Amino acid sequence: MRSDWVNPLCILVLSLLGVVFIYSAQFSFGGGAWRMQLVWIALGWVAYSMVASIDYKIWLTYAHWVYFAGIIGLLLVQTPLGVEMMGARRWINLKVLYFQPTEAAKIGTLIMAASLLARSKLGTVRESLSILILLGLIFLLPMGLIFLQPDLGSTLVFPPMLFALLFVSRLSQRFFVTTFAVFSLFIAIVAVDINGYARHLQAVAEQPTAAERTALGAYQDRSLLPMRDYQRTRILTFVAPRLIDPSGTGASWNANQAKISAATGGLTGKGLLQGTQAQLGYLPKAVAHNDFIYSVIAEETGFIGSALVIALFGLMVANGIRIAALARDRFGMQLATGVSVLFLVHFFINIGMTVGITPITGLPLPFLSYGGSFVLSCFVLQGFIQSVYRHRRVYA
């Protein structure tokens, strides 16, 4: 049975780079996350091999079970088993480790949606209305539960995946035109809301006493949009940093330090363990080895190293799309497409927030950022692509 070696090689190189620069990011503070990352990578390769060896069509039979397992995990987060960290309730305490069910929900939602579309034939929007409604429910349920944690970043990865699946299903173009119009309207509504939040902050700042500032309350209590004020602050920090943080030492600190890291690496970088932003703590140690690992890489390896990382990501996504095109059945095509788009969204948003072209959302970088559940989910998802390549044959 022939295997694809492009993605596994990309995974291997990225994983090794991740361990090296997690070590570097924590070097000055004595952190040992790189050791645990090696454990997660080893477990990830085991998971990858198992998923890749199984004929991917088996997931057609168990799609609903995988999907509901992910939903149950998201619900358990809100029970006493859930653990709150840094103001968010996203983890389940399994005693021996913390598990983030969001990652399982991504996998389950992808499999469920790909399974439904593989069994359905889409045409015009009117002909496909029942399928579209069902797909909407499949995606909205996990998105809503993840948003309530709250985890805006992970919520954002679902819509691009859904539209990619619908696009390769050859749904009527009218649907995408209409959706773009609705999306534009939504962005306009959010823009009005953020503008109102900015005025609220100015009104609070103008109050002479703490009691008067408290009396104005939180903007989220009177807004119609179900967003938290800290999420509005993140958006406002991106679009108007001087308004939300004039000194640059508050909400925009991480973004500013990440950009400094990426900008000061030069052509070849400052060298391993020589990046001042992470080593001196300007890039906070809590985020340098996970959300902002690309900043560490860019500073210490420069343009050459950061370009290599982008090239590996680009090659991985392009090869995944190539494998989707090689699939001989609709389920395999949907599965490989969904995985590739999911990775593309993570790559774009994470690297984008490092260089200042996307808001900071907390999305990690696949195979490079430190993490347990996320690392394992990345290996499992790539295992699906390998399975599609190995077991492609005429759809029955």
Image (tube, rainbow, N blue to C red):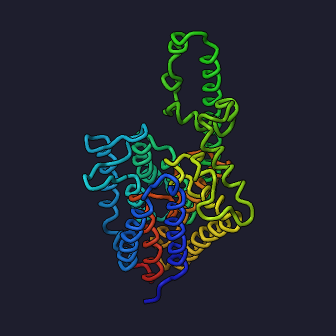
- Residue 110 against residue 137 in the figure, above or below: below
Please tell me which residue lies in front, 237 or 54. Answer: 237
Q: Residue furthest bottom?
A: 1
Q: Nearer the viewer, residue 192 or 163?
A: 192
In the image, residue 373 sits, relative to residue 328, either above or below, namely above
Residue closest to the eye, 31 or 234: 31
Q: Which quarter shows the C terminus?
A: bottom left
Quarter placement of the N terminus: bottom left
Is 258 displayed left or right of 85 in the figure? right
Position of residue 82 relative to residue 313, above or below, is above
Nearer to us in this view, 382 or 283:
283
Q: Please indicate, yes or no, whether residue 338 appears anywhere in the rendered image.
A: no
Residue drawn at (60%, 64%), measured in percent from left and top? 272
Residue lying at the far right of the rendered structure = 267
Please report the residue visible at 74 percent of the width from the left and 65 percent of the height from the top: 267
Percent from the top left, x then y, of residue 317? Answer: 58, 69
Question: On the image, which quarter does residue 232 sit in?
Answer: top right
| Image location of residue 196, percent across then percent down | 62, 25
Q: Position of residue 66 (x, y in %)?
A: 32, 61
Q: Residue at x 44, y 47 (%)?
A: 143
* Res. 182 visible in picture: yes
- Count of numbered circles in the view: 0
x and y, in percent, of residue 259 in the image: 67, 49
